[in-house]
Image (cartoon, rainbow, N blue to C red):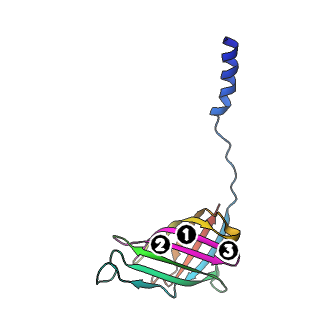
Amino acid sequence: MRNLLIVLGALAVPAYAAPAPMAKHVTKIDVVERAETDVASVKGGSGAENVGDILTFTNPIYDATNTKKVGMDQGYCVRLIGKSIECHWTLTLAKGQIMVEGPVGDGDNAPDTTLAVTGGTGAYKGARGEMLIHARDPKATAYDFHYRLM
């Protein structure tokens, strides 16, 4: 019986060993959104920036140099309490679509924000990862989108 316990104990040790880290392949996509069609619909009150207001958009997407049109995005954001909006949108490129959602800072000097990539189609089917959004100018007329897909 003692020999059996020693053998079973020896077999159990590897189960507690930490798994070796696996290298993850990351697909990087860097594009520029030109915020040409952003339209706010007042839902939460009569003033500007009311809780519940909805921002909708369908905007052109350009390559990282902001010179060649490579796609479009469309979506909506809902105004929350404070200087934040909750956004959901789809980026459409030649090889498929990438879906994104999360809170985005709003207002003057809004900080860069990282959102969740929640799915995709075509070449991006099952995409997961993150997308960093950065306003290119103080008036937020264009944004750098940095997608990192797993």
Report which residue position mark 3 lands on: 96
- Numbered range of the magenta stretch: 82-106
> Which labelled disc corresponds to residue 100?
1
Q: Amino acid at mark 3?
A: Gly
Query: Quarter of the image containing the C terminus?
Result: bottom right
Q: Amino acid at mark 2?
A: Cys
Q: Tag 1: residue type? A: Val
Q: CA distance from mark 2 to mark 1?
A: 8 Å
**Residue linked to disc 2:** 87
Asked if labels 1 and 2 touch by Cβ distance under 8 angstroms, the answer is yes
Residue 58 drawn at (x, y percent): 54, 84
Vertical arrangement, residue 4 with respect to residue 139, above or below: above
Q: Which structural element holds mark 2?
A: strand
CA distance for labels 3 and 2 = 20 Å
Decide: few, some or many residues near mark 3? Use Cα within 10 Å; few <14, some 14-19, many ≥20: some
At a point 29% along the width and 80% down the height, the residue shown is 45
- Disc 1 secondary structure class: strand
